[in-house]
Amino acid sequence: MDTKRKFELESSGMVTARKSVKRRKKLCDSESDTVSTNSQSASSNQKRANKTKHRLEKLRKLTRKLLNHPDQVQEALDGSEPDLVVVLTALAKALSPEKPTPESLYYSQSPRSRLRSSSLELHAQSKLPPLPPVLDKQLQTAMFTHEGVHNPNTASLPEKNYERMELLGDAYIEIIATRLVWDTFPRLPAGRLSQIRELLVKNETLAEYTSLYGLDQKLQVPPNIRDQIKTWTKIKGDLFEAYVAAVILSNRDNGVQLAEDWLTQLWIPKLEQIEKDKPVLRYKEDLAKLVMDKGIKLSYLDEKQSICHSGGLQTFFVGVYLTGWGHKNECLGSGTGFSKVIAGNEAARKALGHPVTHRAAAAKKAYHAAKKEEAAGIRL
């Protein structure tokens, strides 16, 4: 092969190699651009996803805030959208995570811990917690109809009066009150918890709430029944129980929580007062120090038979009597309470202010002073 031919082949090979290198470089650049584009696209998608998550979280919080005040939602819409609370409830459920968070667990945040501050603030302003709405018009009509009244508007309805709702509401009120008392007094025995619960759920308490909200003014009852004090108190208590049931029945998804939050806010001030009024069980001891001595007797006696109330609550009547210092079975004071200990302690408290107690204490002091003088004279 001559020199010229050889040079041409070498030159051709070099050109081909250069072209191959350029093609590979172009292919690499193209692949690099594709990777970069894909990376930018993935980053953009992640930003959009994070933005959407942030918006959904804001919507979830806003929905829950609205559901905390369903009455205000209804007022804002002038009652034109009665199903909006139901829709908001469904939306909140859809937006909530499936797994329960620590905040949703019973012991981490009970109704009392969530609502105590707002309840006491309302009480300080002499205001009542907002009345939760009854969204079902048929239940509203039946709820305000006494069984002794024929209401043509309820003749074709499943619930013709409040009688059945009263039964359901009574059961829910008992459970809600038990939970609240349990949370408020963790160290009290079951018997005492039962007594405190009875103070919350008894007819007199529920009737009081019925009057404060003006529910009794809307109730259709037979003529003259409002003049029968005991009967009317019982009916007002029944009406309150029926209202609780109507709230729960007409708010299928969160009715129980609405009712529990409302009742908790109503009851907290009463329970706070019970805590403040815990008896100081030292009055018996103080009385004994004042008047007791050798041959002196203080007797704590039942003055009459205890009264049994519904729910196992009992009221005891105890008197304290002094024998000695010139008195025989002299009544110094009488007390009542949910146990004999509390009633006796109350009797002793009253006895501390009785004139006979003061005279007996003076007699005791004079007696011991005379003995000291006598002992001093003997030593001399």
Image (cartoon, helix red, strand yellow):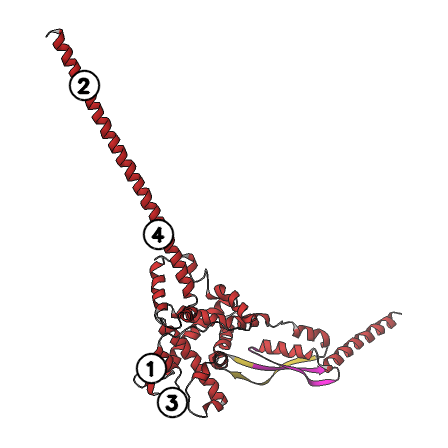
Q: Position of residue 54 (x, y in %)?
A: 38, 52
Q: Nearer the viewer, mark 1 or mark 2?
A: 2
Distance in Å between CA atoms under marks 2 and 3: 110 Å
Drawn side of residue 281 relative to residue 229, left or right: right
Per the rendering, the mark at residue 15 is 2
Q: Which residues are magenta?
A: 316-339
Distance in Å between CA atoms under marks 4 and 1: 46 Å
Location of mark 4 (residue): 52
Q: Main secondary structure of the magenta part?
A: strand
Distance in Å between CA atoms under marks 2 and 4: 55 Å
Q: Secondary structure at mark 2?
A: helix
Distance in Å between CA atoms under marks 1 and 3: 13 Å
Drawn side of residue 187 relative to residue 165, left or right: right
- Which residue is nearer to you in this view: 90 or 6? 6
Location of mark 3 (residue): 149
- Which residue is nearer to you in this view: 76 or 242? 76
In the image, residue 221 lies in the stretch drawn in magenta? no
Q: Amino acid at mark 3?
A: Val
